[in-house]
């Protein structure tokens, strides 16, 4: 059978192990780590989802090999802790039973120990070890490892690899990138030792070679070892791509796959984890360059989720394997869909950083577009309803679509009523912002899923009690969304004012200098987009900070973009809008005029409660979800829609 993407679907052999395709699930930290750092009961299901979804390899992350010098609350593996090895065995089984190769990432945080601790004050109490004595930019001191400690760490890498193999893992990944310990020894910025582990390139390479040799000695020949490295560090004093090539060449004899990532934790988080503002595959060139200089297979990573792009990477010889992390949180079935030629059904990662923000905030995992993530133990398969019911969903935004899809898949007869001529709700407006286009595409994907699931969709039909009653609804899910907040500012209805939700319809009339009224997430992102388009943009915000509704991972990069493309006036309240600008009151009571030819109103959203109140009496079983219940985000809409349908 001819495959639509034959190169992605082609097997590859590493060591003595055959991998079923070229799509690997990159390391992602587990969803629950016990107090003694063992595998928690939720973790096997978290990784199993991607194995069942068709990934050739699934890598569990991160296994800290030497807790004595790395006090991070991450996974450990040992024989002393009761149940520890059993947990790893159950995890390996969960992956391998679906035909994927189970791998585990062997790691040491070095000077960044405790990074993922929820209690950030505790991190400051830890002793941070690294190649050399210094003080991190955040004020935390780092203590140089002794030669005796280095010897013990090298030994622990090998012992951890041996235990992983014993538990049933078929490959190990040695993490030597992103500013973690091995990378710290490789980096001229961090390694200032004057002994056999510092100074010359050969000396800086020595620790990595000893670690890899220790692993090889413990797992034997033919057992695949994957090396994860940063192709370049991307900060002053760090190594560039030439250094990355030299590192790969200096270590390739000890490994079977060279996994080329990018960046360094403290100085380049958003180079490692590409945000929505960066092109997909922005780090692929690093792997492509390294591949020219080594004989071992090379893997690439970096916001990859488009099958055509990934196929080209393999076909053109830029890399031999593509690795995905966030993309497989959003849609674990992505590989299976590619193999089956169903790539138009892929739910794409939004690069919103919900997944990464949740971990330091609550110690769990969550995905904006996948309600199963982190909660797989509660069930990864939809259970058919015991009794088929007539379900009506009022509203075709994210929450309504998710509810309709889930209810239909459970066997209910579902009718979705949407008053507009298009589905997607507020996501329709995202099509005008290039870096948020995938949010607009989410609406299109959910619409396709709804139609494939058999949902009867009525466009241009506003839900009314009469229609719902005529459908003899057993259950009503109200998802009528929200309305934009329009502040009572003189001139707000002027021809030079555009409500942010309508920007996609009126973007062609935006001209010259622009003021964005409102510095929440929507206002900031629209302002950045306009700045990138070449407009002179000022954000006017009455509060003393921007985007408090933005998650802790997305906010730093958003603020960086705001600084780059806009001007900001905090503690400024709009009094009136004139043809030539916005008159504002400052914190001191002074009136100033901010010049503007166009004004974008982004004052937020409010629930459409009038519609909810009118519809609630139309059925005996009623659930309110999404913005009409409480203005939230895509994550809340997806979760509420999914679980409302489970309750019917």
Image: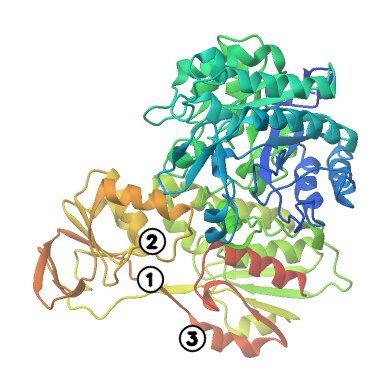
Q: Position of residue 364 (x, y in %)?
A: 66, 58
Q: How many marks?
A: 3
Look at the numbered disc 3 and give the secondary structure of its residue: helix
Q: Are marks 2 and 1 in contact (CB under 8 Å)?
A: yes
Q: Residue at x 42, y 49 (%)?
A: 139
Tell me which numbered mark, 3 or 1, is placed earlier along the sequence: 1
Q: Which residue is denoted by mark 1 in the rendering? A: 604
Q: Which mark is residue 610?
A: 3
Q: Residue at x 67, y 52 (%)?
A: 73
Residue situated furthest bottom in the rendering: 617
Tell me which numbered mark, 2 or 1, is placed earlier along the sequence: 2
Vertical comparison of 204 with 171: above or below:
above
- Colour scheme shown: rainbow
Judge by depth and name the residue closer to the eye, 300 or 371. Answer: 300
> Is 71 left, or right, of 553 in this rendering?
right
Q: Residue at x 64, y 59 (%)?
A: 363
Look at the numbered disc 2 and give the secondary structure of its residue: helix
**Quarter-wise, where is residue 463 in the image?**
bottom right
Vertical comparison of 196 with 48: above or below:
above
Q: Which residue is denoted by mark 2 in the rendering? A: 522
Tell me which numbered mark, 2 or 3, is placed earlier along the sequence: 2
Q: Nearer the viewer, mark 3 or mark 1?
A: 1
Q: Are marks 2 and 3 in contact (CB under 8 Å)?
A: no
**Quarter-wise, where is residue 259 in the image?**
top right
Q: Residue at x 47, y 44 (%)?
A: 275
| Number of residues whose C-alpha sits closer than 10 Å to that of mark 2, classed few (under 14), some (14–19) or many (20 or more) | some
Q: Measure the C-alpha gap from mark 3 to mark 1.
A: 18 Å
Look at the numbered disc 1 and give the secondary structure of its residue: loop
The quadrant in which the N terminus is found is top right
Q: Position of residue 596 (x, y in %)?
A: 15, 59
Q: Nearer the viewer, mark 2 or mark 3?
A: 2
> Is 578 left, or right, of 250 in this rendering?
left
């Amino acid at each position: 059978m001819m495959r639509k993407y034959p190169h992605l679907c082609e097997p590859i052999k590493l060591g003595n192990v055959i991998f079923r395709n070229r799509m690997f699930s990159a390391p992602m930290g587990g969803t629950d780590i016990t107090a003694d750092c063992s595998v928690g009961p939720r973790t096997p299901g978290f990784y199993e989802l991607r194995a069942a979804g068709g990934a050739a390899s699934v890598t569990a992350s991160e296994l800290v090999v030497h807790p004595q010098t790395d006090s991070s609350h991450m996974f450990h593996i040992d024989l002393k802790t009761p149940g520890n090895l059993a947990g790893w065995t159950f995890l390996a089984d969960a992956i391998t039973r679906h035909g994927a190769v189970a791998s585990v990432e062997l790691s040491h945080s070095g000077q960044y120990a405790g990074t993922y601790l929820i209690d950030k004050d505790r991190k400051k109490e830890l002793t941070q070890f690294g190649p050399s004595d210094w003080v991190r930019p955040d004020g935390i001191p780092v203590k140089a490892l002794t030669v005796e400690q280095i010897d013990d760490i090298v030994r622990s890498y090998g012992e951890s690899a041996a235990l992983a193999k014993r538990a049933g893992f078929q490959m190990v990944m040695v993490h030597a990138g992103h500013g973690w310990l091995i990378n710290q020894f490789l980096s001229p910025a961090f390694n200032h030792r004057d002994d056999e582990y510092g100074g010359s390139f050969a000396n800086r390479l020595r620790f990595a070679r000893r670690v890899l040799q220790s692993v090889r000695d413990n797992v034997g020949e033919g057992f695949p070892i994957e090396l994860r490295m940063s192709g370049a560090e991307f900060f002053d004093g760090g190594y560039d791509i030439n250094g990355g090539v030299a590192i790969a060449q200096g270590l390739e004899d000890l490994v079977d796959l060279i996994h080329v990532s990018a960046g360094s934790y403290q100085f380049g988080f958003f180079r490692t984890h590409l945000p929505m503002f960066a092109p997909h595959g922005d780090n692929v060139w690093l792997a492509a360059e390294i591949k020219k200089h080594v004989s071992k297979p090379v893997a690439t990573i970096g916001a990859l989720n488009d099958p055509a792009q990934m196929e080209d990477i393999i076909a053109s010889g830029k890399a031999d394997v593509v690795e995905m992390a966030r993309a497989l949180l959003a849609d674990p079935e992505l590989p299976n869909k590619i193999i089956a030629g169903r790539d138009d059904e892929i739910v794409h990662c939004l690069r919103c950083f919900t997944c990464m923000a949740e971990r330091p905030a609550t110690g769990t995992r969550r995905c904006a577009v996948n309600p199963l993530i982190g909660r797989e133990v509660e069930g990864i398969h939809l259970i058919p309803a015991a009794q088929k019911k007539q379900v009506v969903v009022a509203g075709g935004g994210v929450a309504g679509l998710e509810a309709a899809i889930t209810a239909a898949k459970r066997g209910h007869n579902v009718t979705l009523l949407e008053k507009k001529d298009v589905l997607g709700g507020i996501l329709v407006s995202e099509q005008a912002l290039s870096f948020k286009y995938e949010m607009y595409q989410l609406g299109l994907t959910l619409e396709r899923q709804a139609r494939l699931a058999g949902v009867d969709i009525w466009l241009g039909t506003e839900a009314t009690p009469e229609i719902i009653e005529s459908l003899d609804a057993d259950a009503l899910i109200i998802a009528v969304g929200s309305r934009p907040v329009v502040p009572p500012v003189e001139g707000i209805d002027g021809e030079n004012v555009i409500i942010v939700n309508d920007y996609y319809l009126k973007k062609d009339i935006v001209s010259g200098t622009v003021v964005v009224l409102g510095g929440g997430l929507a206002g900031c992102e629209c302002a950045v987009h306009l700045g990138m388009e070449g407009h002179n943009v000022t954000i006017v915000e009455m509060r003393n900070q921007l985007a408090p509704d933005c998650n802790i991972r997305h906010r730093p990069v958003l603020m960086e973009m705001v600084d780059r493309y806009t001007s900001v006036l905090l503690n400024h309240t709009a009094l009136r809008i004139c043809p030539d600008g916005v008159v504002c009151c400052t914190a001191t009571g002074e009136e100033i005029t901010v010049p503007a030819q166009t004004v974008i109103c982004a004052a937020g959203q409010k629930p459409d409660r009038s519609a909810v109140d009118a519809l609630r009496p139309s059925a005996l079983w009623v659930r309110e979800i999404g913005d009409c219940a409480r203005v939230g985000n895509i994550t809340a809409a997806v979760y509420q829609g999914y679980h409302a349908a489970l309750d019917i």
